Image: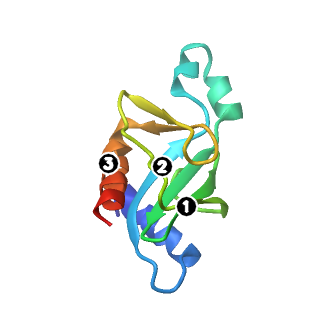
């Protein structure tokens, strides 16, 4: 099972009846560039987040410190009208979701899909 499929499956219990997922991606709270100084900064300060973009809202879920796919709780709900991108670079920094999050390049396509679904609606 791919990482996005695991995130979608783990997000299902937090959805409202009839709500559909448009995009899902992982993020983290600490920039990976701190690894140039010390990996301990990443281990101590970092927390993973799962961002679930639905047709009604955007959910930011807490994943913990060691894994990116489980959703332990929903930290915040952001209006669906929020634009997340455009993402660029190796690590995209965004403040649009209620806290500073860093998104790896592998998920930039998911941000573009979420923003495209917003303009299509």
Disc 3, SS: helix
Q: Quadrant of the N terminus?
A: bottom left
Query: Residue 107: where, in percent of width, then height?
Result: 37, 45
Disc 2, SS: strand
Residue lying at the far top in this picture: please name it: 37
Give the left or right position of residue 30, taking residue 9 as reference.
right
Mark 2 highlights which residue?
Answer: 26
What's the coloring here? rainbow
Residue found 36% across the figure and 27% down from its top? 89
| For marks 1 and 2 on the same chain, the one whose residue lies earlier in the sequence | 2
Q: Quadrant of the C terminus?
A: bottom left
Query: Residue 38: where, in percent of width, then height?
Result: 62, 17
Residue found 44% across the figure and 49% down from its top? 83
Q: Are marks 1 and 3 in contact (CB under 8 Å)?
A: no
Residue lying at the far right in this picture: please name it: 44
Give the left or right position of residue 117, taking residue 83 as reference.
left
Mark 3 highlights which residue?
Answer: 112
Q: In 3D space, how far apart are the residues under numbered discs 3 and 2 (Cα atoms)?
A: 14 Å
| For marks 1 and 3 on the same chain, the one whose residue lies earlier in the sequence | 1
State which quadrant residue 74 falls in: bottom right
Q: Tag 1: Cα neighbours inside 10 Å, few (<14), some, or many (≥20)?
A: few
> Is label 3 or label 2 in front?
3
Q: Is residue 66 at all visible to an observer of this figure?
A: no
Q: In 3D space, how far apart are the residues under numbered discs 1 and 3 (Cα atoms)?
A: 17 Å
Mark 1 highlights which residue?
Answer: 79
Query: Residue 73: where, in percent of width, then height?
Result: 67, 63
Disc 1, SS: strand
> Is label 1 or label 2 in front?
1
> Is label 1 or label 3 in front?
1
């Amino acid at each position: 099972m791919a990482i996005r499929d695991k995130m979608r499956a783990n997000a299902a219990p937090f959805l409202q009846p009839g709500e559909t997922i448009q995009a899902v991606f992982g993020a983290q709270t600490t920039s990976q560039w701190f690894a140039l100084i010390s990996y301990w900064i990443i281990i101590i300060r970092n927390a993973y987040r799962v961002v679930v973009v639905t047709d009604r809202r955007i959910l930011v879920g807490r994943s913990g410190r060691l894994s990116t796919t489980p959703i332990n709780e929903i930290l915040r709900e952001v209006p669906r009208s929020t634009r997340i991108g455009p993402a660029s670079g190796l690590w995209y920094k965004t403040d649009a979701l209620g806290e500073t999050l860093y998104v790896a390049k592998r998920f930039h396509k998911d941000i573009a899909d979420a923003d495209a679904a917003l303009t299509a609606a």
